Amino acid sequence: MDILTKNEIKEQLITLKGWHYPKDQIEKEYEFKDFMDALSFVLKIGIEAEKMDHHPDILLHSWNKVKISISTHSAGGITLLDFKLAQTIETLNK
């Protein structure tokens, strides 16, 4: 899997509302009405990530917030697979 350039990453980020590229990964934080909704979202992400065999870093904090960080560790950077997973995650939050 090819690592994307910074320009390619910026182009891909345009298609994802609220996602950003702070360092070596793409990230987004979601806020929910309560802990159970946040936990349910984490479970949905886990199921889809396992299907893709591509696992994000997931942080559930402040009882109702979930921070997602994605990169392709095996490639050493950001790839199109990271954006595919981010797009899948976006569909889970509707």
Image (tube, rainbow, N blue to C red):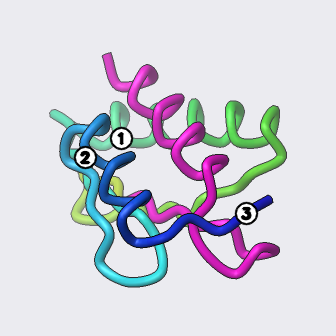
Q: Which residue is mark 2?
A: 30
Label 1, label 2: how many angstroms apart (C-alpha)?
8 Å
Q: Magenta span has 82?
A: yes
Query: Which quadrant is home to the N terminus?
Result: bottom right
Q: Are marks 1 and 2 in contact (CB under 8 Å)?
A: yes
Label 3, label 1: how many angstroms apart (C-alpha)?
33 Å
Label 3, label 2: how many angstroms apart (C-alpha)?
28 Å
Quarter assignment of residue 67: bottom left
Q: Amino acid at mark 2?
A: Tyr
As helix, strand or loop, the secondary structure at mark 2 comes to: strand
Q: Earlier in the sequence, mark 1 or mark 2?
A: 2
Segment colored magenta: 68-94
- Mark 3 nearby-residue class (10 Å; few <14, some 14–19, many ≥20): few
Quarter assignment of residue 33: top left
Q: Are marks 3 and 1 in contact (CB under 8 Å)?
A: no
Q: Amino acid at mark 1?
A: Ala
Q: Which residue is mark 3?
A: 2
Q: Amino acid at mark 3?
A: Asp
As helix, strand or loop, the secondary structure at mark 3 comes to: loop
In the rendered view, tell whether residue 57 sits above or below residue 82: below
Q: Which residue is mark 1?
A: 38
- Mark 1 nearby-residue class (10 Å; few <14, some 14–19, many ≥20): some
Q: Earlier in the sequence, mark 3 or mark 1?
A: 3
Q: Magenta span has 40?
A: no
Q: Earlier in the sequence, mark 3 or mark 2?
A: 3
As helix, strand or loop, the secondary structure at mark 1 comes to: helix
Rendered location of residue 35, percent (x, y) = 31, 43
